[in-house]
Image (cartoon, grey):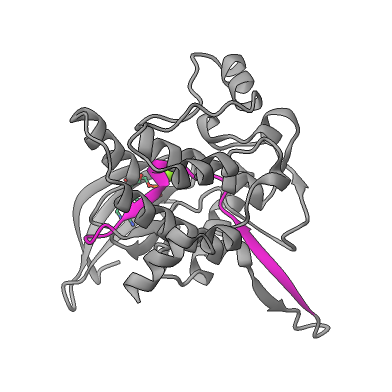
């Protein structure tokens, strides 16, 4: 870690601070996510190793780029060095607009949607892994499992960088579901998680639908003062309407992503074929 000079703290995570650092050799900025593993259960430690391994395999312009890790066994800490996203996170942007009583322009919303979708598509489409022992190939997909505005980071040009893979999972096949107690944030929790206990790619789509809704309405679609009331709202199938300023195209996309039945929700591939997203992608080419 001597190659880096520590700078200010830019965020606080569940297991330590996120600090800006500067590489001494060339002055390039990074962040260092500090993870104190003393207080972690065995399961949380496995999860942390998991986060590092998943990030290491993900190379995409809209996903926070992992650089290296450093284990300090004496201090019982792990440091993950990654790309610095100077634009902060989407939760802060939403707060900024809300405080000023302003709307995020629709073009900006589509840009965010396109970039978040590209990042999620990279995770969901998976990669082929080869079993060295018997030469067989299989596909693994990555489920983020904790999509919320706080975990969508932005760079200096306001480009999306999907981050915080702390709860993400790599699993064998896109269609295979697995039982799991949900550990993410309740506001973005899908109906199948409220009732049952399986999580698949479509649950990430639900959470992303909640995020897009929140970018427009500056509040999550389902709000409640207690868990039971929240569960009922999530299960009701009633999505409150988007503010009038936004197009019916955008409203339809959000509503489809918030279908109570996972099968009715579009895949990332399907969303990327949306004319508005196609237009955005042609313009950046
Ligand atoms: P946790 O897993 O504990 O929630 P996160 O990875 O979400 O930790 O980081 C917590 C906060 O720190 C984020 O919401 C964000 O504001 C900030 N942060 C994390 N990573 C970066 C980064 N690469 N660049 C800039 N800020 C970051
Ligand atoms: Mg987080």
Q: On screen, 270 above or below 206?
A: below
Give x and y (percent) for residue 207: 54, 42
| Quarter of the rendering occupied by the C terminus | bottom left
* Visible residue check, residue 66: no
Give x and y (percent) for residue 113: 42, 53
Q: Which region shows up in magenta?
A: 137-158
**The magenta stretch spans residue 155:** yes
Q: Residue at x 38, y 59 (%)?
A: 161
Outermost residue, right side = 134
Q: Residue at x 27, y 52 (%)?
A: 19
Give x and y (percent) for residue 31: 29, 59
Q: Is residue 230 left or right of residue 149?
A: right
Asked which quadrant contains residue 84, the reply is bottom left
Q: On screen, 130 above or below 58?
A: below
Q: Is residue 71 left or right of residue 134?
A: left
Q: Is residue 132 left or right of residue 117?
A: right
Number of marks drawn: 0
Q: Residue at x 37, y 44 (%)?
A: 16
Q: Residue at x 48, y 47 (%)?
A: 37
Q: On screen, 154 above or below 125?
A: above
Asked which quadrant contains residue 41, the reply is top right
* Visible residue check, residue 279: yes
| Quarter of the rendering occupied by the N terminus | bottom left
The one nearer the camera, 177 or 98, is 98
Give x and y (percent) for residue 138: 76, 74
**The magenta stretch spans residue 185:** no
Outermost residue, front side = 248
Q: Is residue 215 left or right of residue 30?
A: right
């Amino acid at each position: 870690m001597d190659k880096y000079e520590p700078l200010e703290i830019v965020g606080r995570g569940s297991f330590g601070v996120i600090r800006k650092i500067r590489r001494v050799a060339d002055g390039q900025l990074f962040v260092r996510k500090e993870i104190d593993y003393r207080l972690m259960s065995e399961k949380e430690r496995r999860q942390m190793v998991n986060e590092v391994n998943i990030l290491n395999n993900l190379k995409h312009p809209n996903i926070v780029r992992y650089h290296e890790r450093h284990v300090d066994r004496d201090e019982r800490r792990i440091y993950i060095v990654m790309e610095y996203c100077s634009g902060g996170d989407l939760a802060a942007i939403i707060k900024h607009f809300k405080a000023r009583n302003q709307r995020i322009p629709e073009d900006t919303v589509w840009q965010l949607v396109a970039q978040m979708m590209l990042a999620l598509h990279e995770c969901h489409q998976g990669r082929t892994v080869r079993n060295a022992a018997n030469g067989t190939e299989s596909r693994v997909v990555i489920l983020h499992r904790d999509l919320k505005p706080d975990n969508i980071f932005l760079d200096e040009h306001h480009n999306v960088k999907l981050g915080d893979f702390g709860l993400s999972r790599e699993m064998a096949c896109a269609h295979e579901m697995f039982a799991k107690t949900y550990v993410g944030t309740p506001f973005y929790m899908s109906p199948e998680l409220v009732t049952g206990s399986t999580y698949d790619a479509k649950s990430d789509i639900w959470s992303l639908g909640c995020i897009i809704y929140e970018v427009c309405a500056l509040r999550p679609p389902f709000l409640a003062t207690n868990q039971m009331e929240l569960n009922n709202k999530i299960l009701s199938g009633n999505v409150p309407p988007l503010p009038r300023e936004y197009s019916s195209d955008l409203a339809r996309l959000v509503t489809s992503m918030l279908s109570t039945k996972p099968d009715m929700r579009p895949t990332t591939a399907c969303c990327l074929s949306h004319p508005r997203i196609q237009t955005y992608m042609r313009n950046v080419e």
